[in-house]
Amino acid sequence: MALALGLIVADHRYQHLDGVHALFSVVVYPLQFAANQPSHLAREAQESLASKAELQLAKDALYRENLLLKARLQQFEALEAENARLRELLGSSLDVGERVLIAEILAVDLAPYRQQVMINKGTNVGVFIGQPVLDANAVMGQIIHANPFSATVLLITDADHAIPVEVNRNGLRSIAAGTGPSQELQLLYLPKNADIRVGDLLVTSGMDERFPPGYPVARVKQVRQDPANPFAAVIAEPNARLDRSREVLLVWSLSPDPHQRALTAGRSRMQGKP
């Protein structure tokens, strides 16, 4: 005990045993390191598991947020496209100079022998049979059936549809008939020497007193001369986006024909309007 006390006093007051301490610390360090390893490994494993779980939770949260943002982005893109289409329609309505109403396409029937669409406007807003229907670019067709809240549009490419047109370049008149499955128009009864070229714009002539004159209809795509046929074979491509438009324009002429005025007046009397 006396030796131990002496060594303690000598180490504390005179630091004579510093070299011995250093030597023993070097010898004992591996033992200390080995003894500390189990707790160190356990602590690292616990931190690793906790970090992995937190990272997985953060990853799941980011994935859900990313999915939600992508869905919202799709909605924004759809709204942006819809706004662009509506701006085109409104710009077109200013150009045509008629009373117009925007309608939305509800259903499409593009069977080989039926080229029709259904819209969400009907007789309750004044839609009538024979009314011209346009999109932002050109004539699409006309109303053939009208209900109180919906109506059916016969597209200009339907085989049962024909519309009087004229060549915008020189005023040459013809009739553009639908061809059904080919989604094209065929000009009827044009002589072979007619002045018509590929690229000519066809517009409504107004000769049928249904479509006001000057509306774009189609552009000439092909002109062929068949020796066995006394008329030229002229094919035109519609300017309207028949397979892509979602909104259309219903057109009322500023000067309706007497028959339509009589129908409108009769409807107003039945509804008690002046």
Image: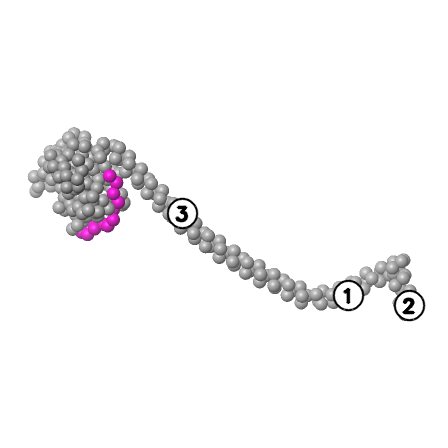
Q: Amino acid at mark 1?
A: Val
Q: For numbered disc 1, what is the local secondary structure?
A: helix
Q: Residues within 10 Å of mark 3 (few under 14, many from 20)?
A: few
- CA separation in Å, label 1 and label 3: 64 Å
Position of the N terminus, as image quadrant, is: bottom right
Residue for point 9% across, 36% down: 191
Q: Residue at x 87, y 59 (%)?
A: 12
Residue 73 tag number: 3
User: Of residues 237 and 271, which is closer to you in this image?
Assistant: 271
Res 136 seen here: yes
Give the amino acid type for the residue marked by disc 2 in the picture: Leu
Secondary structure at numbered mark 3 = helix
Residue that label 1 marks: 28
Q: Quadrant of residue 132?
A: top left
Residue at the spot of label 2: 3
164 shown above or below 105: above
Spatial distance from mark 1 to mark 2, Cα to Cα? Answer: 23 Å
Q: Nearer the viewer, residue 199 or 268?
A: 268
Q: Which residue does the image show at 30% across and 39% down from the upper left?
A: 86
